[in-house]
Amino acid sequence: MKSFVPQVLRFESLPSTNLEAARRANQDAAEGLCVVAGEQTAGRGRLQRYWISPKNAGLYCSIILRPEFPQSLWPLITLMAAVAVHEALKKACALETDIKWPNDILATNRKVCGILAETIETPTGRAIVLGIGINLAKSSFPEDLKAEATSVEDVTGHKPQSEIVLTALIESLAMYYEMLKNPAGSEAILREWCARSSYADGKQIRVVESNESFIGTTCGLEPDGALRVETLAGEIRVVRAGDVTSVRPG
Ligand code: BT5
């Protein structure tokens, strides 16, 4: 199997690094191409949501992956990316984070990083654009985000250089992506994810799915990375898409 060769392309400003990386993937860009922007004017979250990306306040990047392993394992790429971000923030910023299923990175229970993996069709085959946004600098989040968002600087008192975080991130992504490609790679990534997430087991959460919501307690991951939740009625439900929030016991 080919290995991941990082190549970084920098822009001062883009609507969205995911869009630019998808455009380049459509023009045959190779696996490992990483598009970075100093700001995004239309940063995207999942499900048509937005990602606030003020100028020089965060690391906004998107990496093209062209996995050769079965597509049934592709959902594990987002979990792999969360583990890689966790490690990069530890190494580059001495910041310990938690992972909220499936791939929000939390510091002091607030979101410091979001990950958006999009599958796209390109002339040279199906690819993934892996978008990662990390809040580095203290910034004035809009009122409705203040309670749920934070930055590395807010938590550590120090604004890291975006280049240092990017280097650590690319190194750790390359390493965990290689791990995922191994024959026992999916089990290994699930283990690494569970070791870094308070949401893996025994966490009381609310799950909001497209047309219902319920409360339960987490009890591990399925082999494809879906979250197992025991409902108040004692039934095990498997959550593949949905938003999870922590609820206090009682
Ligand atoms: C995500 O979506 O968390 C994925 C975010 C991915 C952003 C990166 S930046 C580089 C690349 N290029 C892009 O265009 N996107 C990727 P989701 O789980 O849907 O969360 C979105 C929600 O997070 C929003 O609805 C807000 O509530 C909140 N949010 C928006 N901006 C935020 C920020 N900077 N920090 C923390 N929370 C934010």
Image (cartoon, rainbow, N blue to C red):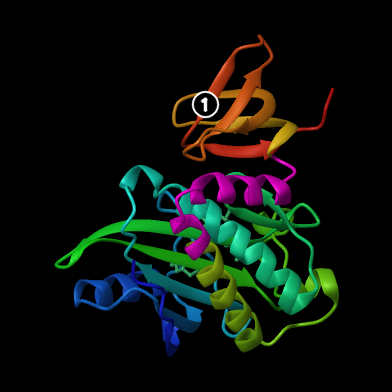
Q: Position of residue 204 (x, y in %)?
A: 74, 29
Question: From the viewer's perspective, is 133 left or right of 8?
Answer: right
Q: Residue furthest left?
A: 123
Q: Nearer the viewer, residue 131 or 149?
A: 131
On the rendered image, what quadrant is the C terminus found in? Answer: top right
Horizontal and vertical percent position of residue 130: 43, 64
- On screen, 107 above or below 193? below
| The quadrant where residue 63 appears | bottom left
Q: Is residue 121 left or right of residue 141?
A: left
Vertical placement of residue 56 versus 74, above or below: below
53 with respect to 98 (left or right): left
Total numbered circles: 1
Is residue 184 left or right of 120 when viewed as pictured?
right
Q: Position of residue 169 (x, y in %)?
A: 59, 74
Query: Where does ligand 1 appear, by image quarter?
Result: bottom right
The amino acid pointed to by label 1 is: Val
Main SS of residues in magenta: helix
Mark yes or no: residue 219 visible.
yes
Residue displayed at 72% across by 48% down: 195
Which stretch appears magenta? Answer: 178-199
What is the x, y in percent for residue 136?
68, 76
Q: Which residue is depicted at the point 39% across and 76% down?
A: 32
Q: Is residue 180 magenta?
A: yes
Q: Which residue is mark 1?
A: 238
Foreground of the two, 213 or 84:
84
Instruction: Determine which quarter of the picture holds residue 129.
Output: bottom left
Query: Is residue 138 at all visible to an observer of this figure?
Result: no
